[in-house]
Image (tube, grey):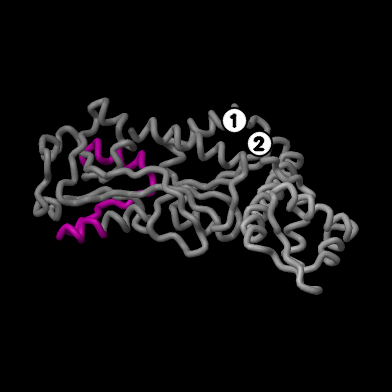
Amino acid sequence: MELPDLRQVKSLVAVAETESFTKAAERLNVTQSAVSHSIRALEGQLECTLVERSGKRVALSQEGTVLLRRFRGALGELEKAGDELAVLRRWGQGRLRVGATHTLWHFLLPKVMQEFRKLYPRCEIHVESGDTSELVDFLDRAEIDLAIGIGGRGPGWARFEPLFDDEMVYVVSPQHAWAGLTEVPLEEVEKESFLVYGRASETYRILRASFESAGAKIRPSLSLGDMGAIKEMAKVGIGVAIVARWAAQKEIDAGDLVAVPLGDVKLNRKWGMFCHESRHLSMVEEDFMRLFRKVAAEVIA
């Protein structure tokens, strides 16, 4: 089938929305006969009636209604393309405003940004770091356009697109009594001191809820906001850290830390991207998220 041209698309949408050939012509800044000609040509091309006339009343047929939905979508995509081109003209190669948790910036984002810079060397980049709740606040205040964090409690106005899941483990020094265990009894958990990520964080909320669901309570001895500090404290035996395996894989491979499964405690996090529900990702943002997924798959695997 020959595709309709843009004048025909705009004419059908304008007639449908104004219910008048005269008003449609005024909206499009063309003559009424031009609108009528575009509709007749489209009907002839598709071999069906799109607009039904009854006196002064104008309405779409069933076929016209089907086309209207598609035509509106097509016009919307063209408008978005125009917006993206305007951004490119303004910023050189676009703009990226993204927020992510401290852990992601430490372990994943450097590689992502390195690859991203190769694609968009002149892109203006604005970044924020913080816990998931902080990032959502940045998003709400329009200080960033994308936030990458832990899902589960997002606001109603935000869209969440899953990226990857991870599972937490105990990590201890090789000299710790748990280092040789394949599973830690829950009664032993309540006797131990733990090194945990900030108590106001989403990770700590999930951690506490998971242990309580399993029938145990953890006793945090140190609450730290830096993953590097948590691992260093675990290395020297200050306590047991609870972290994602991928965040401590380097130390585990080197033999500086030992990973021990949580056993009956199921502690999984769902990571993803938050943005406003109606937001259409730009080409720059889509490429950034594509690179993020690629790097995450390599690191988390």
Mark number for residue 123? Answer: 2
Q: Residue at x 73, y 36 (%)?
A: 92
Query: Looking at the image, which is closer to me, 246 or 156?
Result: 156
The quarter of the picture where residue 66 lies is bottom right
Q: Residue flagged by tag 2: what amino acid is it? A: Cys
Q: Is residue 88 above or below residue 135?
A: above
Query: Looking at the image, which is closer to me, 29 or 170?
Result: 29
Q: Residue flagged by tag 1: what amino acid is it? A: Arg
User: How many neighbours does mark 2 have within 10 angstroms: few (below 14), some (14-19), or many (20 or more)?
Assistant: some
Q: Is 236 situated left or right of 187 in this image?
A: right
Q: Point out the image quarter for the N terminus.
A: top right
Query: Looking at the image, which is closer to me, 88 or 57?
Result: 57
Q: Residue at x 56, y 32 (%)?
A: 116
User: How many neighbours does mark 1 have within 10 angstroms: few (below 14), some (14-19), or many (20 or more)?
Assistant: few
Mark number for residue 171? Answer: none
Q: CA distance from mark 1 to mark 2?
A: 8 Å
The quarter of the picture where residue 208 lies is bottom left
Q: Can you give x and y, in whole percent of width and height, for residue 173 in the image?
A: 20, 35
Residue range corresponding to the magenta coloring: 209-238
* Labels 1 and 2: the sequence-earlier one: 1
Q: Residue at x 48, y 30 (%)?
A: 111
Secondary structure found at label 1: helix
Q: Can you give x and y, in whole percent of width and height, for residue 144 in the image?
A: 58, 51
The quarter of the picture where residue 152 lies is bottom left
Q: Is 119 situated left or right of 27 in this image?
A: left
Task: Please say whether residue 215 is one of the residues in the magenta stretch.
Answer: yes
Asked if disc 1 and disc 2 are in contact, CB closer than 8 Å, the reply is yes
Secondary structure found at label 2: loop
- Which residue is label 1 attached to? 117
Q: Can you give x and y, in whole percent of width and height, for residue 298 in the image?
A: 39, 30
Q: Is 38 situated left or right of 192 in this image?
A: right
